[in-house]
Image: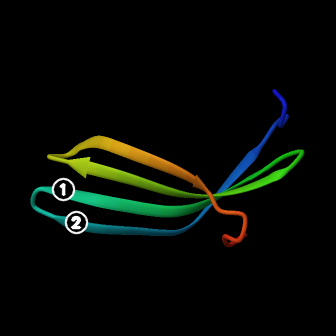
Amino acid sequence: MAQGEQKATVSDLAEAANPKGATVTANVVFAGKNTVKVRYVMLYTDGKLSDEIWQVDPNGKS
């Protein structure tokens, strides 16, 4: 592993939902040899995970 062992810290977890689906967002910081800040977005349709996006966010919250 190029990054070595990492610890993940999740913050600012939020959900927006309606009867057909939901969007869950979170800030995640992976800390190891380097620190990588990402914005995680999960899309749910009919109760199932339908898509997810991991966006590297260097200016995100720690």
- Quarter of the C terminus within the rendering: bottom right
Q: Which residue is mark 1?
A: 21
Asked whether, in this view, residue 33 is left or right of residue 9, the answer is right
- The amino acid sitting under disc 2 is Ala
- The amino acid sitting under disc 1 is Gly
Give the colour scheme of this rendering.
Answer: rainbow
Distance Cα–Cα, label 2 vs label 1: 6 Å
Q: Quadrant of residue 24?
A: bottom left
Q: Residue at x 14, y 46 (%)?
A: 46
Question: Residue 56, percent across and down?
Answer: 64, 55
Total marks in image: 2
Q: Which residue is mark 2?
A: 17
Element at badge 1?
A: strand
Q: Quadrant of residue 49?
A: top left
Marks 2 and 1 in Cβ contact (< 8 Å): yes
Q: Say few, some or many: other residues with alpha carbon within 10 Å of mark 2 (under 14 / 14 to 19 / 20 or more).
A: few
Vertical relation: 13 (above or below) 3: below
Q: Residue at x 89, y 45 (%)?
A: 33
Q: Residue at x 41, y 46 (%)?
A: 52
Question: Residue 26, percent across and down?
Answer: 51, 63
